[in-house]
Image (cartoon, rainbow, N blue to C red):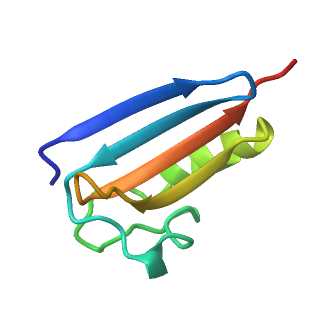
Amino acid sequence: MPKKVTITIEDSAEQVLIVVSDDGAGIEESQREQIIKPFVRGKAEHKGYGIGLAIVQRILHWHNGTLTIGNDDELGGAKFSISLPKQG
């Protein structure tokens, strides 16, 4: 369970970037493509139904956005980056 979570928002002329990072265990590279699928959870002991990231991915698809999953260099845990293009 992460103890620290950071949320940053960057606004540019072309896009809005939202980054959520934590100091938890992170997400293994081999799991990153899997956890955005419906009903897939990162680890068996995690609570929930495994649909949250699948919903996020679908909404981003509708809005031509992207979700990038990685690990945060500073905090050491997971890092979720959401990029949404601005409509002109």
Answer above or below: position of 26 versus 54: below
Q: Residue at x 51, y 52 (%)?
A: 53
Answer above or below: position of 42 versus 88: below
Q: Residue furthest left?
A: 3
The answer to which image quadrant residue 29 occupies is bottom left
Q: Nearer the viewer, residue 75 or 55?
A: 75
Q: Residue furthest bottom?
A: 30
User: How many labels sit on residues?
Assistant: 0
Q: Nearer the viewer, residue 62 or 75?
A: 75
Q: Residue furthest right?
A: 88
Taking the image as shown, residue 58 lies to the left or right of residue 36, namely right
The answer to which image quadrant residue 88 occupies is top right
Taking the image as shown, residue 68 lies to the left or right of residue 66, namely left
Answer above or below: position of 27 versus 18: below
Q: Position of residue 19 (x, y in %)?
A: 45, 39
Q: Position of residue 65 (x, y in %)?
A: 71, 41
Q: Residue at x 33, y 46 (%)?
A: 21
Taking the image as shown, residue 25 lies to the left or right of residue 9, namely left
Q: Quadrant of the N terminus?
A: bottom left
Q: Position of residue 17 (x, y in %)?
A: 57, 34
Q: Residue furthest top?
A: 88
Taking the image as shown, residue 84 lies to the left or right of residue 1, namely right
